[in-house]
Image (cartoon, helix red, strand yellow):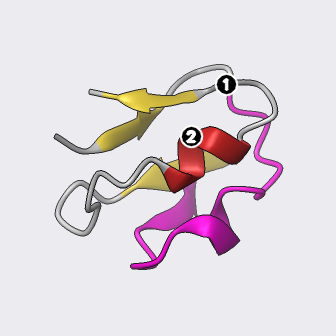
Amino acid sequence: MAYKVGDACINCGSCDSECPVDAISEKENARWIDPDKCQDCGSCSSVCPVEAIAAE
């Protein structure tokens, strides 16, 4: 199950460098996680300052 970025995202980019498979990119002024690349490690979720990332 891939992680997903919710509406609370402030587009800070703190999650980008944490993703070991480069599944995170910017889309419509927020971060987006490619579900086909996401390995469900949770690294992005643990560094999100507004807790906008969660498992689907």
Q: For residue 23: magenta?
A: yes
Q: The disc labelled 1 sits on which kind of residue?
A: Glu
Across and down, in percent, residue 34 comes to 31, 59
On the image, numbered disc 2 is attached to which residue? 45
Q: Which mark is residue 40?
A: none
Q: Is residue 28 visible?
A: no
The magenta stretch spans which residues?
9-27
**Mark 1, residues whose alpha carbon is within 10 Å: few (<14), some, or many (≥20)?**
some
SS state under label 2: helix
The residue type indicated by label 2 comes to: Ser
Helix, strand or loop status at disc 1: loop
The vertical placement of 16 against 53, above or below, is below
| Residue in view at x 59 percent, y 21 percent | 7
Q: Horizontal and vertical percent for residue 23?
A: 40, 69
| Residue 51, label in figure | 1
Name the residue rendered at 39%, 36% in the picture. Answer: 4
Q: Residues within 10 Å of mark 2 (few under 14, many from 20)?
A: many
Asked where in the image residue 50 lies, by quadrant, the reply is top right
Give whichever of 28, 48 is nearer the camera.
48
Report the predominant secondary structure element of the magenta stretch.
Answer: loop
- Do labels 1 and 2 touch, CB within 8 Å? yes
| Quarter in which the N terminus is drawn | top left
Residue 43: image location, x then y, percent: 53, 54
Quadrant (top left/top right/bottom left/bottom right) for the C terminus? top left
Q: Is residue 1 left or right of residue 52?
A: left
Looking at the image, residue 52 sits to the left or right of residue 43; the answer is right
Residue 14 seen in the figure: yes
Relative to 25, 36 lies left or right: left
